[in-house]
């Protein structure tokens, strides 16, 4: 009977009910939207960074990460590499030989980062092939090189030109060669776009007099939750011969930046919940005071306060459910559309993101927890706001209420 009475009370004054439900509706939509953008942006940044050269996990020689010298290069035979690729949830394994060299064309000379890699594996991890804007991508037999767009403009080279590489190879050997430009690649990250040169791994090993040697073995995995078990399996294969680092250890600055942004986002979300809480409370207080005479009349004709409190509380639950359900549906539609069609940013924000090597996109995340967390929090806020009408009815004096209007 109380449930039926509460439901009928809601629709006796549709305008009041819709106003109360709307406050909860907008609270859910705003919180879902804000949290989705925050989490989507952080996940996008992390994914792009992990999908770059370091990967999720990297195996390299001891002290290589600090010295970055070919003398810390290692040999990992094909049998071990096959074992790594067979580890569950490892999606790609990329062997690389990296060093620095002078690169010259005509009268122009510049220091460049030389990266020898397996073209197929590299493309699986970093989508390098999609970044080719002129010429052709490398293959396993290619003796050409890929030059970053910014570096190509500095040297004034184009596809088909031959450029000189001159540097130091393994254990002090001279590394010099004249190699043709097979293609031009464009990177979003300015530093990478100004100094990167890619070539076939075998060509790089020949250039630096380091046959069968690599400086690192980078791993891409299917899901971040498998990071620790995969790292453990890699250690069991490698033993203590090499150094194994996860992306957090290789990029502590990024981890700190993300943690600081998460903390700032949490504060913003708390402020949003605080504003939402005051909005819901103000709405509940408004429609409670509007019903002062109604409450006084019901008590005067014999309705016990406890029953009236129960009816009012059930009404609040119904209003909360309507607002939360509608907010979740609309929030899902907005977030789902945003996930399929990321918002492209412009202006200073876009320039800032490009300077960090990220495409200027506002991305969204969609997970069950995104909705359940916001729905639970907003529902709790609504139910806490329901304490006001309960206390109001408990202290209500019927005679005074009937003569108040």
Image (tube, helix red, strand yellow):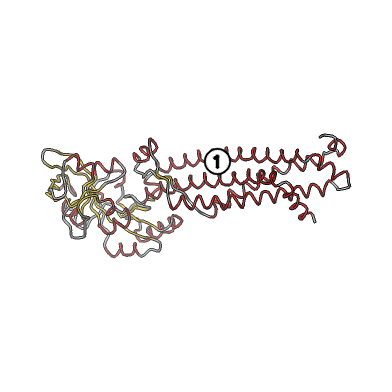
Where residue 373 sits in the image (x, y, percent)? 58, 50
State the residue position of label 1.
269
| 300 sits to left or right of 10 | right
Q: Secondary structure at mark 1?
A: helix
Name the residue rendered at 53%, 38% in the picture: 268
Q: Nearer the viewer, residue 24 or 273?
A: 24
Q: Nearer the viewer, residue 165 or 1?
A: 1
Q: Residues within 10 Å of mark 1 (few under 14, many from 20)?
A: some
Where residue 138 sits in the image (x, y, percent)? 21, 56
On-image quarter of the N terminus: bottom right
Q: Nearer the viewer, residue 247 or 9?
A: 9
Q: Nearer the viewer, residue 175 or 29?
A: 29
Name the residue rendered at 56%, 46% in the picture: 29
| 125 sits to left or right of 32 | left
Q: How many marks?
A: 1
On-image quarter of the C terminus: top right
Where residue 153 sits in the image (x, y, percent)? 20, 41
Q: Is 239 placed above or below 40 here? A: below
């Amino acid at each position: 009977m109380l449930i039926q009475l509460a439901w009928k009370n809601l629709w006796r004054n549709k305008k009041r009910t819709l106003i109360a439900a709307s406050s909860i509706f907008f609270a859910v939509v705003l919180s879902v939207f804000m949290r989705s953008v925050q989490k989507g942006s952080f996940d996008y940044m992390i994914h792009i960074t992990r999908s770059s050269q370091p990967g999720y996990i990297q195996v390299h020689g001891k002290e290589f990460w600090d010295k970055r010298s070919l003398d810390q290069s290692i040999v990992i035979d094909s049998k071990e590499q096959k074992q790594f690729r067979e580890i569950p949830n490892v999606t790609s394994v990329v062997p690389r030989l990296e060093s620095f060299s002078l690169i010259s064309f005509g009268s122009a000379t510049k220091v460049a980062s030389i990266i020898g890699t397996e073209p197929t594996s590299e493309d699986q991890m970093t989508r390098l092939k999609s970044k080719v804007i002129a010429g052709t991508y490398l293959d396993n037999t290619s003796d050409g090189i890929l030059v970053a767009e910014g570096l190509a403009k500095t040297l004034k080279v184009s596809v088909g030109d031959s450029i000189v590489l001159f540097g130091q190879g393994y254990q002090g050997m001279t590394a010099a060669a004249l190699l043709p430009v097979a293609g031009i690649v464009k990177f979003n990250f300015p530093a990478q776009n100004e100094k990167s040169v890619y070539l076939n791994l075998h060509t790089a090993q020949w250039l630096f007099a380091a046959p069968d040697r690599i400086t690192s073995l980078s791993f891409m995995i299917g899901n971040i939750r498998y990071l620790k078990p995969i790292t453990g399996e890699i250690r069991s294969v490698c033993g203590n011969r090499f150094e194994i680092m996860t992306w957090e250890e290789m990029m502590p600055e990024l981890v700190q930046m993300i943690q600081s942004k998460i903390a700032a986002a949490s504060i913003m979300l708390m402020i949003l919940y605080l504003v939402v809480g005051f909005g819901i409370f103000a709405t509940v207080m408004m429609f409670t005071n509007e019903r002062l005479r109604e409450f006084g009349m019901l008590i005067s004709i014999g309705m016990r306060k406890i029953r009236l409190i129960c009816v009012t509380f059930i009404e609040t639950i119904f209003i909360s459910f309507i607002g939360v359900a509608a907010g979740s549906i609309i929030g899902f539609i907005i977030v789902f559309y945003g996930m399929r069609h990321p918002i492209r940013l412009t202006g200073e924000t876009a320039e800032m993101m490009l300077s960090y090597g990220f495409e200027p996109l506002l991305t969204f995340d969609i997970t069950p927890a995104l909705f359940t967390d916001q729905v639970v929090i907003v529902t709790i806020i609504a139910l806490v706001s329901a304490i006001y009408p309960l206390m109001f009815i408990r202290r209500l004096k019927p005679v005074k209420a009937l003569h108040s209007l």
